[in-house]
Amino acid sequence: MPLKSKLSMQIEKRKMIGVVGGMGPYSGLDLIKKIFDLTKADQDQDHVPLAMISVPHKIEDRTKFLEGATDINPGIEISRIVNQLSQQGASFIGMPCNTAHSPAIIKEVYNTMPKGVTFINMIVEVIKFIQDKYQGVDRVGVLATAGTIKANVYNDQLIKNNLIPIILAKEEQKELIDESIYNKDFGIKSKSDPVHKNALKNIELAIESLIEKKAEIIILGCTELPLAINSPSYKSVPLIDSTMVLAKSLLMYLNQKVLKKTINKKW
């Protein structure tokens, strides 16, 4: 039998990462890819143990719930998935959906959190990342779903940490971001790979609008947005990929020794 590397032997002692997928389905895949990309690995056995459950047909749309279009709280199904991941051996669980971190939804998850499981809060990790990597920045742009904006998912956390949230005007939000995500002809939820050129153009216009409003950095606060914009900056303004932040945080909590040193020092 071939000798095992020291790294692969360390992995056998590690616990497992769990991913709550399906919101949207490509966002779950994107998180897993970024976890793999950030992992220091020379062979299959060096990669971290990971499980994802993606059952999008069971999870109600988060923005619909937050805007009152449905009474079905998606957090109830999400909490079931977290428990299923725990049963599979996951001890550090992440959820690549910013909107699902709204207090009205995530409280269902926290209320039924299994023992021995650490839930990595994406929003908290993004704020910590900004404070660590962008000290001195005050004005933070936020691109997100209407549900995330309405629930002040990022705004409250930014203000709490003495940062100024910069968001789009209501019409810009609707025409540039909501349409880019939900439009059945060109939105990212219907055209994920590749992303339609109309969605990409709209998102770029939204970024430019936040830059005009003097945003110093911009959070891509919907995990569908990095599927369209994968650059670390736009016209020299840093873009914070919330999915990438979550991927790095999950690895750090699991075992920081497996985290690859990246070329981009900001990551």
Image: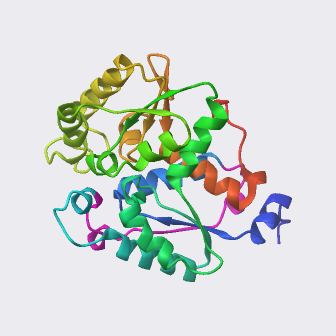
Q: Which of 254 and 115 is in front in this view?
A: 115
Q: Nearer the viewer, residue 170 or 58?
A: 170
Q: Residue at x 83, y 72 (%)?
A: 1
Coloring scheme of the render?
rainbow
Q: Which residue is drawn at 14% across and 48% down?
A: 184
Residue 21 pos. (x, y %): 42, 63
Query: Residue 46 falls in which quadrant of the image?
Result: bottom right
Q: Which residue lies furthest to the left in this view?
A: 185
In the displayed structure, does residue 92 sit left or right of residue 196? right
Q: Which residue is drawn at 58% across and 36% down?
A: 130
Query: Residue 175 falls in which quadrant of the image?
Result: top left
- 197 up-or-down from 259: above or below: above
In the displayed structure, does residue 29 sit left or right of residue 258? left
Q: Is residue 49 magenta?
A: yes
Dividing the image into 4 quarters, which one contains the C terminus? top right
Q: Is residue 198 magenta?
A: no
- 6 up-or-down from 36: above or below: below
Q: How many marks?
A: 0
Q: Which of 222 and 169 is in front in this view?
A: 169
Residue 258 pos. (x, y %): 74, 53
Q: What segment is highlighted magenta in the picture?
A: 39-62
- 11 up-or-down from 153: above or below: below
Q: Residue furthest bottom?
A: 87
Residue 112 pos. (x, y %): 49, 79
Q: Residue at x 64, y 28 (%)?
A: 135
